[in-house]
Image: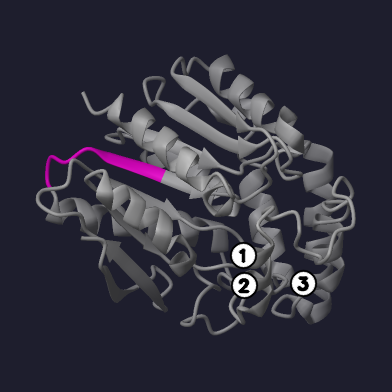
Amino acid sequence: MGECVRETFLSVTGETVGKRLWLPEGKPRAVLQLLHGMAEHIDRYDATAKAMNKAGFAVVGHNHLGHGQEAKTLGHFARQHGWDALIEDTHALRQNTQASYPGTPYFLLGHSMGSFVARGYALKYEKGLSGLILSGTGHFDPPLVAVGMLIASLQCALGAGEKPSGLLASISTAGYNKTYEKARTAFDWLTSDADLVDAYIADPLCGSPFTARGYRDMFEGISRLYPGKLSTMARDIPVLLLSGEDDPVGAYGKGVKKVAQELRSVGISDVTVKLYEGSRHEMFNEKEKERVWGDLVGWMEGRLS
């Protein structure tokens, strides 16, 4: 139980991406598909996947384009339509997995950037999902997203589309550490667990800035998530939002609540928000992660019927 099967599959772009499958003992009660965040990789979710296995859930996930050991360029999705490629890869993995577990309830969980992919995915392919879980998500005002897209587009036009954008990296995370006293590193906002922050920094597959084109793709994807564009999302899909109250990405809970409000405003009634006091961005790497795992399992169990 909990053994990780390491495989690969072909992205819609033709590139190879890493796939991971964690299986429980016996027949799974449900399948949980994980979408990791920006500048990390799916193997960082091993402990979470094994916790889900103990509760009887199978877990599957993959490395997004531009992430993990298979990436040709870290932080770069594709030369064209990169955000759509992330969504289509997510769907391809879901279809492949469901073929192996027909009739089994299926949940989708996205963390941080993965939550934006999951939200975009739900606008197109939400049919049949038992629930959508958004971890460490956020709400970004349209003018800010537009400025980010403009800067990224200018850098692309100047021939720097496939180069890391230090400018956008610094702008994107500016002020993320400002509420923490005596921050040790540039990544203290990730989790209050110093050992896991250090492990992230030491991981060569984590922390790299996106390319200008990668940022442009991400900002374009986020721009699709405002209320006026949510009308295609199924009204009966349950949604769970998990976040730390000290998470700057979620504006310390305010942005998370705003996302929940926007989902409710288009008629989605089953929206649950769980905010954790004293916790930062990566809820599954926080000191109280076992409580978060328990809450996640309990929420999914409540939707299995």
- Number of marks in picture: 3
Task: Characterize the local packing of mark 2: few (<14), some (14-19) or many (20 or more) Cα atoms within 10 angstroms.
Answer: few
Task: Characterize the local packing of mark 3: few (<14), some (14-19) or many (20 or more) Cα atoms within 10 angstroms.
Answer: some
Q: How far apart are labels 1 and 2 at the CA level?
A: 5 Å
**Magenta part of the protein: which range?**
102-108
Query: Which quadrant of the figure has residue 167?
Result: bottom right
Q: Nearer the viewer, mark 2 or mark 3?
A: 2
Q: Amino acid at mark 1?
A: Leu
Query: Left or right: where does residue 224 sit relative to residue 127?
Result: right
Q: How far apart are labels 2 and 3 at the CA level?
A: 32 Å
Furthest toward the bottom, the residue is: 72
Residue 182 shown in magenta: no
Query: Left or right: where does residue 301 sit relative to residue 246?
Result: left
Q: Kindly identify which residue carries mark 3.
A: 156
Identify which residue is drawn at 16% across, 47% down: 28
Q: Amino acid at mark 2?
A: Ala
Q: Kindly identify which residue carries mark 1.
A: 196
Q: Amino acid at mark 3?
A: Cys
